[in-house]
Amino acid sequence: MPKLTPKLEARFNEYLNDAWHSGENLRFLLDNLREHFNPDYSVESLEAAERAYWKHSVLGIPADISSQEQFAQLLGQYLGESIRHHTGANWTQCIEDNPMFAQPFIDSFGRSAWDRIYPVQLAIQINNLQESYPGAAEHRAFAATLERAIKSHKSKSS
């Protein structure tokens, strides 16, 4: 079984720190792209950010502001924080021997131990325009993921 190294643990902690500031970082990015954004952790805020993401995937993002990859990463971090806000979920670092090893994921929001969301993987898939991901074809993969997490959490509570 692989073991987390201090370097991998430090990367996880850096990711968490960025995630905790993702609302303000996303607002800063979108302000610079002249897009309105209110980071209130709602499904609607994710929809607005995702619309801007797809719009700027066509228009481009000035290199001195950011990149499409960084934008997708911010969306993933903001998604994680939105799920935490609505469900009380936790950020966890994967220690299982699988392709997700050492990646951050959101856990403890649904009934099943396998109710997990890997924001890094979602950001990579969206950035590579893999429209097979649920909600990607409609340009609302992040919002749809938040909706599924909230629904899973409500079914856990009932």
Image: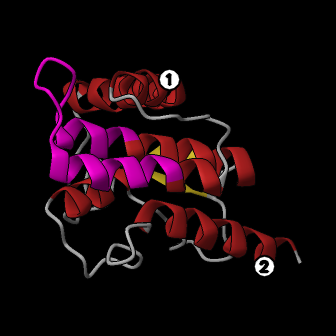
User: Outermost residue toward the right?
Assistant: 158
The residue beneath circle 1 is: 21
Look at the image and say whether residue 18 sits in the magenta stretch. Answer: no
Magenta stretch secondary structure, dominant = helix
The residue beneath circle 2 is: 155
Give the secondary structure at mark 1. loop
In the displayed structure, would residue 143 be above or below residue 84? below
Q: Position of residue 24 (x, y in %)?
A: 51, 22
What distance separates the C-alpha of mark 1 from that of mark 2?
A: 29 Å
When asked about the image quadrant of residue 126, the answer is: bottom left
Tell me what residue is drawn at x 37 percent, y 68 percent. Answer: 139
* Residue 62: mark in rendering: none
Give the secondary structure at mark 2. helix
Q: Position of residue 155 (x, y in %)?
A: 78, 79
Tell me what residue is drawn at x 67 percent, y 50 percent. Answer: 42
* Position of residue 65 in the picture relative to residue 119 (left or right): left
In the displayed structure, would residue 115 be above or below residue 73? below
Tell me what residue is drawn at x 63 percent, y 59 percent. Answer: 108
Mark 2: which amino acid?
Ser
When asked about the image quadrant of residue 127, the answer is: bottom left
Nearer the observer: mark 1 or 2; the answer is 1
Give the mark nearest the N terminus, 1 or 2: 1
User: Outermost residue toward the left?
Assistant: 63
Mark 1: which amino acid?
His
Residues at discs 1 and 2 in contact (Cβ within 8 Å): no
Q: Quadrant of the N terminus?
A: bottom left
Q: Which residues are magenta?
A: 48-74
Q: Residues within 10 Å of mark 2 (few under 14, many from 20)?
A: few
